[in-house]
Image (cartoon, rainbow, N blue to C red):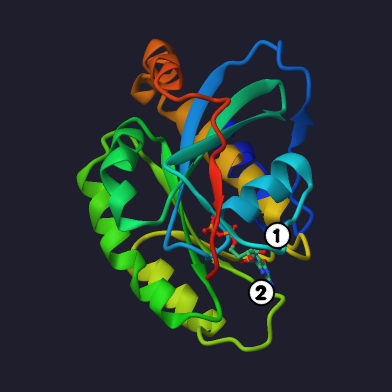
Amino acid sequence: MENEKEKQDEKEMEINEDFKLDRILDNNTVHKYMFRICLIGNICVGKTSLLSRYSDNYFKQIYSATIGVDFRVITLKYKDIVAKVHVWDTAGQERFKSISINYYRSSNGFIYVYDITDMESLKGLDSWIHLTTENCNTNVINFLVGNKSDLENREVSKEEGEEFAKKNNLIFLETSAKNNDNVDKLFEYFTYKLIKYYEKNKEQYIQDETDTFGQFDNINLNEPKKKSCSC
Ligand code: GDP
């Protein structure tokens, strides 16, 4: 009976177009879970824009490359369960791959991003998926995101995105960081899926907070993370 109710709840959440979790702005709110997710993909697909749109409701038209790794912490609540989510924005450049691998290891999931106007950016995800699955041990939920859905010069159809997602067992969404389409849904649905997963499989949840903060120490947060670049 309880199981039936859970299934029903989940179904309602899945089909509800206006999917929403409560955003908590007070950083001192006690959390039950701390998750780490990574944004992955080629440069220029919109990883940084998705994160800044969600965390600061900000969109910058002019491109500047992420240097190394940047992150934001967002706090969300589903029913009475509060989860802190560290979202890591890893640089898409080849030379930063080795830095990023450290962040993949303790990630609970990945958001693989491509640009719907650039077929190469979807094809490029094969190697990112390979790299991340080889170098992570705790991830359970992964998303595929076709970003820049506001643009008309599309090279990747929605069906091709869906097919790629199905092949790689990813949850698929198209987004526009520019128009703020599906961006809230992406981060909130991801968090909801993680909460649901770990509520069902509590014994699998091992999050070493000291490890996370150890990694923060290695990053100079005052250092500018962006440099100008044309793409
Ligand atoms: P990253 O290298 O993957 O982090 O990409 P950025 O977030 O820095 O974005 C690269 C470029 O694409 C920037 O010029 C952004 O303004 C632009 N961009 C990002 N998201 C969108 C979007 O949803 N629509 C449009 N039209 N442009 C976007």
Q: Evaluate whether residue 204 shows in this view.
A: yes
Mark 1: few/some/many CA within 10 Å (<14, 14-19, 20+): many
Viewer-side residue, 147 vs 162:
147
The image's mark for residue 149 is 2
Q: Give residue 212's position: percent from left, percent from top.
A: 42, 20
- Residue at horizontal 59%, vertical 31%? 2
What whole-number distance in Å separates the C-alpha atoms at marks 1 and 2? 10 Å
Q: Secondary structure at mark 1?
A: loop
Callout 1 touching callout 2 (CB < 8 Å): yes
**Helix, strand or loop for disc 2:** loop
Q: 137 or 26: nearer the eye?
A: 26
Residue 3, compared with residue 228, is above or below; it is above
Q: Quadrant of the N terminus?
A: top right
Query: Callout 2, which amino acid?
Result: Ser
* Vertical comparison of 109 with 73: above or below: below
Q: Is residue 220 left or right of residue 76?
A: left
Q: Is residue 80 left or right of residue 191?
A: right
Q: Label 1 belongs to which residue?
A: 182
Ligand 1 within 8 Å of the CB at mark 2: yes
